[in-house]
Image (tube, rainbow, N blue to C red):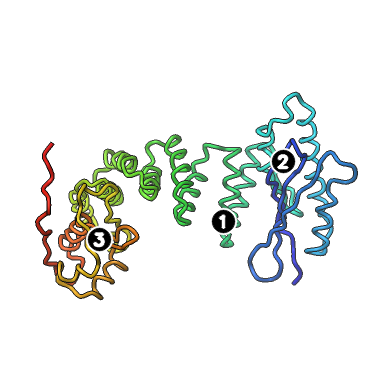
Amino acid sequence: MRAHLRFLILDDFDPDTGELALRVAFQPGPEPGLEMIRLRLHLGRSGNPLDPLSRELRTHVQMPVPPLWEHGLKMIIHAIEEELAGPDGRNALRYLWVRTQILHPAEPARSTPNHAVPRQVEVLRDWAHRLDQEGQSLRAAEVLDRLLLLAPKDVTTLAYLAGFFRAQGMAEEMAAVSERWIKIEPDRVEAWLRHGEALLRLGRAQEARAAFEAVLKAHPVHLLAHLGMAQALGLLGGNPFPHLDAAQELDPAATASVLRETFDYRLLTPPVGDRNYPPEELPALIGVSGAEVQDYVQFLGLPLAGPEGTVRESELARWVGVMNRYALLPGGLHWSAPTPRRLPELA
C-alpha cells in the first residue's frame, strides 16, 4: 500500500519574514501511524509560493498537491496578504487565526477554510476525536489547543486537555488549563480536583489545599478531595490523618492503594534541627531487615532526603504512622522516635 495524505495543518505566520509554517501528515503504509513533513512557504517572493510543498510531496509521497490544498492555501495566503497591507500588518497577534486552519486532501467539509467560526470549531473537534480514536492522543491534544483559539470557553476541550496533561505528567500545562476551566465552570468538581492535583505536583501545596477545600465545602464526603487534602496538609507539615481517616471510611481499598503507591511522605519544609538517619541505621530503628528497608523505599514511598540518601526523622515518623494506622504492612513497625538531641525553644 502506497503512502497517503491525511491532513495539512498551518502552524504560524511570521509577518517580519513572510514565512508561513505548516506540516503535512501522511500515513506511510498500511500500519497505523503518522509521519510529518515540516516546511515553510515564503510569501512576497517571485514565483509560486506553493513550490516547496510541491517538491516535498513529490519526494515523500510521490503525489502532486491536492487541488483542495492548493485552493485552501491560496485563500489563506490572500487573506494574509490583505492583513499585511493594513496599518497594523506587522502585529503577529493578527495572525493567530492561521494556527486554526487544517486542510483535508479531498473533503471540503473536513477543512476549515470557507467555513464560519462555529463550523471551524466542529471541524477541529472532529479531527481531534478521530485522532484520539486512532491512538494519536498527542496530535488530538494539539488540534484541541488550536480549537481553544476559536472557542476559548469550550469546556469539553478544557476537560480533555486537563486529562491529557495529567496522563502525560505535564503539571504546569495541567494547572494552566484547569485554572481556565474553573473560571468558566466554578462549580465543576473535576476542574478543582485536576487543578489541586497539578498544584501538588508543582509543590504548590498551599494553593492545592485551597482547591481541595473548595471541593469539600460542596461535597464533604468526596474521596479524592479528602485524599488530596491529606496530601496537601502532609506536605505542609500539618495533620493529614483526619482526611485519611475519612477517605479510609469511604473506600478502604482505594485509600490503601494511594498510600502505598502515590502518596508523598515528604515535608516541603522539614523542622529545624531534624535528625537524619542513613538507611543502614533503619533496620535497628524499626525492627526490619535491610532488604525490607530497600523495598519500603522502592515500593512504599519511604522518602530519602538529599544526595546522601538519608531519611529525615520527621518524615520517617509520618511514614511509620501511616503504615501502622492503616495496616499497610503484614506486621506493625515497632518504632518510636529517639529523644531529640535538643528540645526546640518555645516561642
Residue 185, relative to residue 242: is it above or below?
A: above
Question: Mark 2 or mark 1, which is nearer the start of the sequence?
Answer: 2
- Give the image location of residue 141, x and y in percent: 56, 51
- Give the image location of residue 239, x and y in percent: 19, 48
Instruction: Give the residue number, with chain letter if any, for mark 2.
Output: 13
Report the Cα–Cα distance between label 1 and label 2: 22 Å
Q: Quadrant of the N terminus?
A: bottom right
Q: Would you identify the image quadrant in which residue 302 lies?
A: bottom left
State left or right for residue 212 relative to residue 140: left
Q: Would you identify the image quadrant in which residue 199 lies?
A: top left
Helix, strand or loop under label 1? helix
- One can see residue 48 in this view: yes
Residue reaching furthest top?
87
Report the Cα–Cα distance between label 1 and label 3: 39 Å
Question: Mark 3 or mark 1, which is nearer the start of the sequence?
Answer: 1
State left or right for residue 21 relative to residue 316: right
Instruction: Give the residue number, with chain letter if any, for mark 3.
Output: 311
Q: Amino acid at mark 3?
A: Val
The 10 Å Cα crowd at callout 3, few under 14, some 14 to 19, many 20 or more, is many
Residue 322 is labelled as none
- Give the image location of residue 88, x and y in percent: 72, 26
The 10 Å Cα crowd at callout 1, few under 14, some 14 to 19, many 20 or more, is some
Helix, strand or loop under label 2? strand
Instruction: Give the residue number, with chain letter if any, for mark 1.
Output: 138
Q: Amino acid at mark 1?
A: Leu
- One can see residue 222 in this view: no
Residue reaching furthest front?
341
Question: Mark 3 or mark 2, which is nearer the start of the sequence?
Answer: 2
Q: Amino acid at mark 2?
A: Phe
Q: Residue at x 68, y 34 (%)?
A: 92
Report the Cα–Cα distance between label 2 and label 3: 53 Å
